[in-house]
């Protein structure tokens, strides 16, 4: 299916955040433990592909001059994910899906206002696309890190929807996101928990795991109508029998 067709009137949108080498496999900010979410993330991606829902993938891509390198209060080594390095590539496990995703390079933790450079897409930013969708029921975010790029995108998306009276659900499945761990500096469990609390307060839906809600299939509807029909027949029979025995 062509990208434009998949984007048109989408009911659900998936955003895969920073599942790149620089955070999961190599480089100063990589934490291999976060690779544990890969199988879960792959399942969700495959479900979205099956349903022809659009999938966006954020990649953290900086230059040496990016102001973000100076953030994080000196808690982290700073230079990361420089353009042209292998750190900015999607992890090899996601490569098979890359052609079905719209990749957005972001120079900040938030990517919803980063320019979309895909030649076939008329929208300038992801935020612009999301608010244009009339049928959108859910935006799902998966990837890393829970307390940084996941939270820094999930909350602005939810607040943008709130501002415009859009009731679309913003979902962050807890088992499909993770953050890094540095002993004594950044406790993974604690920061995951804190991020979940902030996101919960912001109105974000945080299920333990993601279950894609599908509408009733055609055969399910047929069975449903058949059951109602048979029940009506049965009722009619009872009424007639009652009337005759009176
Ligand atoms: Zn960055």
Image: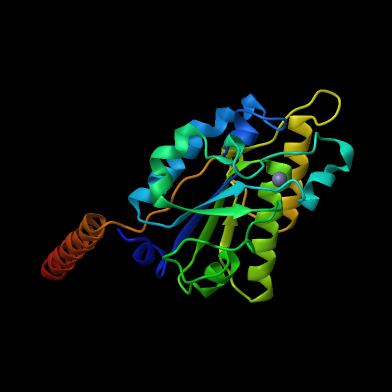
Q: Position of residue 208 (x, y in %)?
A: 58, 40
On the rendering, which quadrant does ligand 1 occupy? top right
Q: Is residue 239 left or right of residue 106?
A: left
Which residue is pictured at 56% across the width and 65% down the height?
168
Q: Residue furthest left?
A: 244
In this view of the protein, which residue sits in the foreground, 59 or 235? 59
- Name the quadrant of the N terminus: bottom left
Give the x, y percent position of residue 229: 18, 64
Residue 27 in the image, given as x and y percentages of width and height: 67, 30
> Residue 114 at x, y = what percent?
63, 61
Give the residue drawn at x 37%, y 49%: 49
Which residue lies at the image location 72% right of the left edge and 38% below the top edge? 192
* Residue 71 visible in the snapshot: no
**Quadrant housing the C terminus:** bottom left
Q: For this view, does 229 lie left or right of residue 141?
A: left
Q: How is the protein colored in the picture? A: rainbow
Q: Is residue 124 above or below residue 54?
A: below
On the picture, is 89 further left or further right than 178? left
- For residue 23, above or below residue 171: above
Residue nearer the viewer, 92 or 13? 92
């Amino acid at each position: 299916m062509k990208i434009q067709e998949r984007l048109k009137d989408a009911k659900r949108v998936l955003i895969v955040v920073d599942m790149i080498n620089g955070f999961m496999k190599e480089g100063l900010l990589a934490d291999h433990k976060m690779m544990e979410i890969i199988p879960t993330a792959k399942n969700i991606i495959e479900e979205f592909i099956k349903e022809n829902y659009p999938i966006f993938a954020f990649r953290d891509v900086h230059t040496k001059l990016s102001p973000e390198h100076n953030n994080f209060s000196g808690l982290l080594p700073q230079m990361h994910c420089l353009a042209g390095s292998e750190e900015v590539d999607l992890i090899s496990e996601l490569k098979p899906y890359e052609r079905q995703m719209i990749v957005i390079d972001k120079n900040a933790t938030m990517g919803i206002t980063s320019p979309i450079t895909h030649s076939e897409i008329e929208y300038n930013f992801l935020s612009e696309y999301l608010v244009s969708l009339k049928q959108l029921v859910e935006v799902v975010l998966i990837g890393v890190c829970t307390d940084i790029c996941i939270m820094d995108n999930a909350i602005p998306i939810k607040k943008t929807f709130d501002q415009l009276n859009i009731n679309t659900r913003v979902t962050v499945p807890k088992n499909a996101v993770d953050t890094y761990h540095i002993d004594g500096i950044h406790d993974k469990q604690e920061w995951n928990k804190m991020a979940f609390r902030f996101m919960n307060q912001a109105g974000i839906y945080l299920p333990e795991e993601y279950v894609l809600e599908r509408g009733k299939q055609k055969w399910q509807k047929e069975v449903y109508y058949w059951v109602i029909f048979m029940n009506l027949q049965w009722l009619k029979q009872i009424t007639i029998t009652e009337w005759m025995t009176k």
